[in-house]
């Protein structure tokens, strides 16, 4: 998940985040990131459903043309 990062590098990153945002802001930051990820996944599912419905309509039109 973190590529070639070791434990010491991850610890340094966590400390920098603590210094930048403070302990009280980190839960809010994590909540915002989670909400953004949920919205992105929902939008992705909606686009996939739209593509599938367009494909289905195209297939139906092709079948009608063959008849």
Image (cartoon, helix red, strand yellow):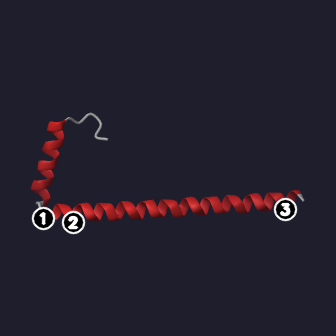
Residue 59 placed where, x, y %?
75, 57
Q: Tell me, for residue 64, which label it has, or none.
A: 3
Residue underneath mark 1: 24
The reply to whether dot 3 and dot 1 touch (C-beta < 8 Å) is no
CA gap between label 2 and label 3 equals 54 Å
Task: Left or right? Give the position of 35 relative to 64.
Answer: left
Residue contact between numbered discs 1 and 2, judged by CB atoms under 8 Å: yes
Count residues near mark 3 (Cα–Cα under 10 Å), then give few for <14, some for 14-19, many for 20+.
Answer: few
The residue where tag 2 is placed is 28
- In space, the residues marked 1 and 2 are separated at their CA atoms by 8 Å
The quadrant of the rendering that contains the N terminus is: top left
| Left or right: 56 as drawn, with respect to 44 | right
**Lower sequence index among marks 3 and 1:** 1
| In the image, residue 33 above or below residue 7 | below
Question: Which of disc 3 and disc 2 is earlier in sequence?
Answer: 2
Give x and y (percent) for residue 4. Answer: 26, 33
Find residue 19 and report its horizontal and vertical position in percent: 9, 55
Marks 2/3 in contact by CB < 8 Å: the verdict is no
Q: Quadrant of residue 24?
A: bottom left
Q: Quadrant of the C terminus?
A: bottom right
Label 2 element class: helix
Mark 2: give few (<14), some (14-19) or many (20+) Cα within 10 Å. Answer: few
10 Å neighbourhood of mark 1: few (<14), some, or many (≥20)? few
Q: CA distance from mark 3 to mark 1?
A: 62 Å
Extreme residue in the right direction: 67
The residue lying at 73 percent from left, 59 percent from top is: 58
Query: Residue at image x 40%, y 65%?
Result: 39
Q: Residue at x 14, y 43 (%)?
A: 11
Q: Residue at x 54, y 61 (%)?
A: 47
């Amino acid at each position: 998940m973190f590529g070639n990062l070791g434990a010491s590098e991850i610890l340094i990153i966590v400390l920098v985040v603590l210094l930048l945002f403070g302990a009280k802001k980190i839960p809010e930051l994590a909540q915002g990131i989670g909400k953004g990820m949920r919205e992105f996944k929902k939008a992705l599912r909606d686009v996939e459903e739209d593509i599938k419905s367009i494909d289905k309509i195209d297939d139906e039109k092709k079948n009608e043309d063959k008849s």
